[in-house]
Image (tube, grey):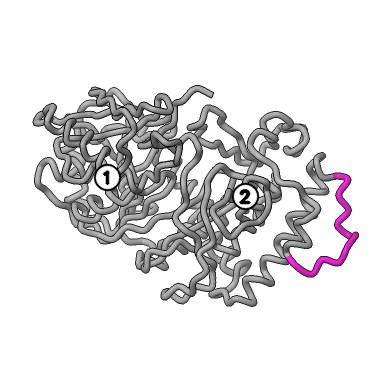
């Protein structure tokens, strides 16, 4: 088992992190972007992706790219309609190449399927390298030096689930990385994990918001701290209450990142807390319910630049955001958006039917102690179920305080049912959904 892991991470390092990969990517992407260079690069890469889509995807074979005067990105993209996950699932032979059968040299990425509809995406090696390049660039911009000690607390399968004795981690020497099993963030294993992190003393922790928050909750329960200067989160929404406790107990600064398996958008947080759309990664649009561009909150639509195996054109996600028309103090030329709002399945509504921001909901949990883990689920239009994994000191007083806080700070017209659970499971990919809408359509 150990030898297999060594080989896995050796080959992963060789392909994704070796000096040859870095050299090729830096040569392709060039130096620090300016407004003009970013715009020129977008125009060139969008044109290449559209040509590739017309050549390889049956849905676009009738599109004539030579017709018309393409002076802008909007001109180039206008001949292509917006598509959704449902289109890909229902018409795979139209939107996938090679009759929806990947070639041997393709990497097959999978979405987590948290909404019940997992999706596979074909990727070529270059797109895998590009993804890794953008992630590493984000890390470096936030102060992490590649090669320093780092730890990972994500969905990786590190040890068997039934393992009850340490180690619950594996040291990847090629990246100087301690990989920790997030599935062992439980009371019986947490002391060993905390001690290992303290001994390893990483400069950076890469985690899901939920796994970093769970670690921080255990530290709070034990009145302990770690010292990890940089925390990178991604793959789930990062809520204000999570960030506050993570930064307090890990004694570091957190930076969030937004991406997805479909690789149609890449948004990174700078040192000033603003979320920047990386314009060299893809073309991002924001559209309203009628698929028309909007300056208000709308759906994220992205077009890939770097995946010849399966170019996704104007792919509409169920995540929502809004352009933020500011010049960020960090000096980045990349445009800024408001924090991304989750999917409908991660959106709950108050008694009047108005949507409730999960960030607002976090205020109700402030000052409520003795909760190891929680989840807020909308069961009907009038009922929320708050599921709680309590610690040994939890009592009805804590639950009543939470109910009172929700009524006073969030919504007074919703019925709250507190349900105690032994555990709240993550998805198969190791992610956790703190807010979930379970109303029947």
Image coordinates of residue 71 in percent, x first then y, are 79, 69
Q: Residue at x 26, y 38 (%)?
A: 407
Locate residue 286: give its quadrant. Answer: bottom right
Q: In terms of secondary structure, where does tag 1 sit?
A: helix
Q: Residue at x 25, y 51 (%)?
A: 246
Magenta-drawn segment: 61-72
Binning the other alpha carbons within 10 Å of mark 1 as few (below 14), some (14 to 19) or many (20 upward) gives: few
Is residue 99 visible in the rendered structure shown here? yes
Residue with the mark numbered 2:
288
Observer able to see residue 430 = no
**Quadrant of the rendering where the N terminus is positioned:** top left
Left or right: where 309 falls relative to 218 = right
Q: Position of residue 434 (x, y in %)?
A: 35, 37
Quadrant housing the C terminus? top right
Task: Report the front residue among 314 and 196.
Answer: 314
* Count of marks placed on residues: 2
Verify whether residue 82 appears in magenta: no
Let me know if residue 70 is in the magenta part.
Answer: yes
Instruction: Determine the secondary structure under disc 2.
Output: loop
Who's the residue at 9% across and 31% down the image? 393
Q: Which mark is residue 409?
A: 1
The tag earlier along the polypeptide, 2 or 1, is: 2
3D distance between C-alphas at marks 2 and 1: 29 Å
Can you give x and y, in whole percent of width and height, for residue 43 in the image? 72, 66
Q: Is residue 112 above or below residue 135?
A: above
């Amino acid at each position: 088992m150990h030898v297999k892991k060594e080989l896995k991470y050796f080959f992963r390092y060789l392909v994704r992190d070796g000096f040859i990969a870095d050299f090729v990517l830096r040569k392709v992407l060039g130096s620090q972007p300016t407004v003009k260079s970013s715009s020129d690069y977008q125009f060139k890469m969008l044109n290449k992706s559209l040509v590739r889509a017309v050549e390889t995807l049956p849905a676009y074979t009738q599109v004539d790219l030579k017709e018309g005067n393409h002076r802008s990105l909007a001109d180039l993209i206008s001949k292509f309609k917006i598509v959704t996950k449902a289109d890909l699932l229902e018409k795979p032979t139209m939107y996938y190449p090679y009759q929806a059968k990947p070639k041997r040299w393709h990497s097959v990425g999978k979405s987590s399927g948290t909404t019940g509809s997992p999706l596979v995406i074909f990727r070529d090696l270059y797109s895998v390298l590009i993804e890794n390049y953008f992630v590493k660039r984000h890390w470096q911009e936030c102060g992490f030096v590649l090669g320093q000690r780092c730890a990972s607390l994500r969905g990786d399968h590190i040890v068997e689930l039934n393992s009850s004795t340490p180690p619950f981690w594996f040291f990847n020497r090629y990246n100087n990385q301690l990989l920790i099993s997030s599935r062992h963030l439980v009371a019986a294993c947490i002391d060993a994990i905390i001690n290992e992190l303290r001994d390893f003393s990483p400069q950076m922790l890469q985690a899901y918001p939920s796994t970093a928050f769970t670690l921080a909750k255990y530290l709070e329960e034990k009145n302990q701290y770690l010292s990890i200067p940089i925390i990178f989160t991604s793959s789930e929404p990062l809520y204000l209450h999570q960030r506050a406790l993570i930064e307090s107990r890990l004694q570091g600064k957190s930076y969030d990142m937004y991406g997805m398996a479909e690789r149609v958008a890449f948004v990174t947080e700078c040192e000033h807390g603003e979320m920047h759309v990386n314009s060299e990664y893809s073309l991002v649009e924001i559209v309203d319910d009628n698929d028309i561009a909007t300056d208000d909150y709308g759906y994220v639509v992205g077009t890939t630049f770097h995946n010849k195996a399966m170019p996704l054109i104007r792919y509409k996600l169920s995540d929502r955001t809004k352009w933020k028309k500011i010049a960020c103090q960090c000096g980045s030329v990349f445009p800024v958006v408001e924090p991304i709002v989750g999917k409908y399945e991660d959106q709950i509504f108050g008694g009047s039917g108005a949507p409730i921001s999960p960030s607002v909901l976090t205020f109700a949990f402030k000052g409520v102690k003795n909760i190891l883990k929680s989840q807020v689920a909308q069961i009907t239009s009038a009922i929320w179920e708050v599921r709680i994994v309590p610690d040994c000191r939890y009592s009805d007083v804590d639950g009543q305080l939470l109910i009172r806080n929700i009524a006073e700070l969030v919504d007074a017209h919703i019925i709250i049912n507190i349900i105690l659970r032994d555990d709240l499971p993550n998805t198969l990919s190791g992610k956790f959904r703190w807010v979930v809408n379970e109303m029947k359509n």
